């Protein structure tokens, strides 16, 4: 939903110049070690959700352009989405950007502050996460940067917080979330 909204606001409304995506690089299991390549290539394995969502959104397109049209559309979309590592955010200022911070439940309050304070004029920041899915060993629901940001921005007229009543993946995912 955040990606679809961002794409609309970047490509159709031209409210923002591009989408910046980042996330906490916390593994669910064992760390796989060194990853070769550029910053974007290193972030690739962490951005599977981006690929999944782009694939889902592309299938929803009822256009008649065929495979070449979908490829051209995907290329245009990808050119407006930049994947950035949190490790290189200090000192940056994002102007007129739509910033998505994914897996924000795995951030510390300090990391969250560092990312949110990168926002320059005309920038919107979306923090997404599920406090039931914290993978950072020393964080809890109460100490997560996501909780910290929600609490600190309460009452600020330019901020908002949405808690989804149910998951959007599938009945299986919802059931597993409840019983496991």
Image (tube, rainbow, N blue to C red):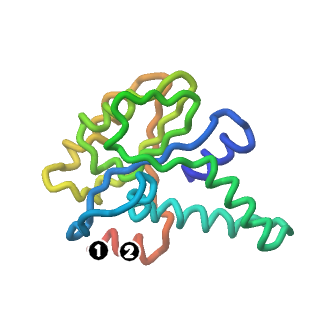
| Placement of the C terminus among the 4 image quadrants | bottom left
Q: Which residue is mark 1?
A: 179
Horizontally, residue 168 falls left or right of residue 56, namely left
Task: Write down the quadrant of residue 47 in the picture.
Answer: bottom left
- Circles 2 and 1: CB distance less than 8 Å? yes
Exactly how many numbered labels are in the figure? 2
Q: Which mark is residue 36?
A: none
Q: Is residue 92 left or right of residue 2?
A: left
**Residue identifier under label 2:** 175
Compare residues 144 and 142 and report the one nearer the observer: 144
Q: Taking 32 as reference, is 43 left or right?
A: right
Q: Position of residue 10 (x, y in %)?
A: 66, 41
User: How far is the residue under mark 2 from the one under mark 1?
Assistant: 6 Å
Q: In percent of the image, x 31 and y 55: which residue is there?
A: 25
Q: Name the element at disc 1.
A: helix
Q: Depth check: 32 or 128 in front?
A: 32
Q: Is residue 18 above or below residue 177?
A: above
Bin the neighbour count of mark 1 within 10 Å (Cα to Cα): few under 14, some 14-19, many 20 and up: few
**126 relative to 24 in the view: left or right:** right
Q: Residue at x 29, y 74 (%)?
A: 179
Q: Specify the farthest residue to the front.
A: 37
């Amino acid at each position: 939903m955040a990606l679809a909204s961002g794409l609309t606001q970047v490509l159709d409304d031209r409210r923002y110049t591009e989408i910046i995506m980042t996330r906490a690089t916390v593994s669910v299991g064992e760390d796989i070690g060194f990853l070769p390549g550029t910053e974007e290539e290193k972030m690739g394995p962490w951005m599977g959700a981006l690929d999944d969502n782009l694939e889902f959104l592309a299938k929803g397109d009822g256009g008649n352009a065929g495979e070449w049209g979908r490829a051209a559309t995907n290329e245009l979309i990808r050119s407006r989405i930049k994947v950035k590592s949190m490790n290189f955010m200090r000192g940056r200022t994002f102007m007129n950007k739509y910033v998505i911070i994914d897996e924000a439940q795995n951030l510390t309050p300090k990391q969250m502050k560092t990312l949110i304070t990168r926002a320059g004029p005309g920038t919107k920041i979306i923090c997404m996460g599920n406090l039931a899915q914290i993978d950072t060993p020393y964080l809890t629901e109460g100490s997560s940067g996501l909780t910290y940001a929600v609490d600190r921005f309460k009452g600020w007229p330019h901020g908002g917080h949405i808690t989804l009543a149910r998951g959007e993946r599938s009945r299986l995912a919802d059931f597993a979330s409840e019983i496991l």
